[in-house]
Amino acid sequence: MSVRPVTLLMTATVAPARGMRTSLGNPQARRDEYIAALCFYRDWIGRGIDRIVFVDNSNSDLSSFNAVSDGYPITLLSYQGISYPAAHGYGYGEMALIQHAMDHVPELGEGVVVKVTGRYRVTNLTSVIQSAAGVDFAGDIWNWRRPWLDMRIMMWTKRGYNMLLRDSYLLLRDDENRLPPEMILSRHIMASTDVAVRTYLMVDPIVLGVRGMDGKDWGRGSLAFKRRVRALTRPFSLVFSLYPGARRDKEYRSI
């Protein structure tokens, strides 16, 4: 059986629109963080991922990225995708960006797509990817009673994307919803019984970087402590990760 290629999709907004909620609004500072992250992930090519697709939705000049992408299987794409009102929110923008990428970059229609928030670095990326084999969608959904999808890293096949996530951005407008996009997407994913879904990653992702919402560092303080607690409890939580009504992911072999 041939091994399907793994493409890392880095989502980015180099120059946020006025009114968008972010603790890091300076385009140059954001650009520097994206370039640093691209350098980090470039070194994973050939040891867990086969290529990288970097997509920015602020129509920014990406020529400064060429120095770190030339000679590597890296695709750079920038388009004007933040023309929607800021009130629509970050979830709407993120999933709309992903759909644009899936529709305009042919490589994303092959094999497995691993989506990461572009400024973050997942230091155990290969282990996380390997742990999610065999399903059409994989991601962490925390708290079964009030499910919350961790959108920092998710994985899918083309079939999984089309069945679960296509047009999902239309559900995520903050100005129309009382719940955050992470909770709406969680319910949307958990309701599906047509594709193989893994709602709990077998390996705890170690994410480094500064959170855009409030400037907190994922690798320090309360966020780092919360991750360590989740890492310790993850083996026990896996026992309860199959939600009522869902088909067991072992019944499908897609990724």
Image (cartoon, rainbow, N blue to C red):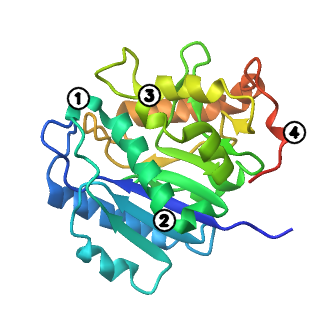
- Give the residue pinned by disc 4: 251
User: Which residue, given by chain and number where applicable, does mark 1 sit on?
Assistant: 87
Name the kind of residue labelled 1 in the image: Ala
Identity of the residue drawn at 20% across and 45% down: 24
Report, in whole angstroms, how far the alpha carbon at label 3 lies from the one at label 2. 24 Å
User: Which one is closest to the eye, mark 4 or mark 3?
Assistant: 3
**Tag 3 secondary structure:** helix
Give residue 101's position: percent from left, percent from top.
45, 57
**Front residue of 225 and 45:** 45
Q: Tell me: 142 left or right of 30.
A: right
**Residue density around tag 2, few if under 14, some if 14–19, many if 20 or more, within 10 Å:** some
For label 1, the crowd category at 10 Å Cα-Cα, with few meaning under 14, some 14 to 19 and many 20 or more, is some
Amino acid type, callout 3: Leu
User: Which three-letter amino acid code belongs to the residue tagged 2?
Assistant: Val
Q: Which residue is mark 2?
A: 105
Between the C-alphas of marks 2 and 4, the distance is: 30 Å
Comes first in the chain, label 2 or label 1: 1
Task: Tell me which residue sits at (60%, 42%) in the image.
Answer: 204
Say which label, 3 or 1, has the lower sequence index: 1
**Left or right of 107 in this view: 209:** left
Query: Residue 199: which disc?
Result: none
Q: Position of residue 237 (x, y in %)?
A: 69, 26
The residue under label 3 is 171
- Give the amino acid type for the residue marked by disc 4 in the picture: Glu
120 vs 197: above or below: below
Q: State which tag comes first along the sequence, 2 or 4.
A: 2
* Residue 180 drawn above or below residue 108: above
Secondary structure of the residue carrying tag 4 is: helix
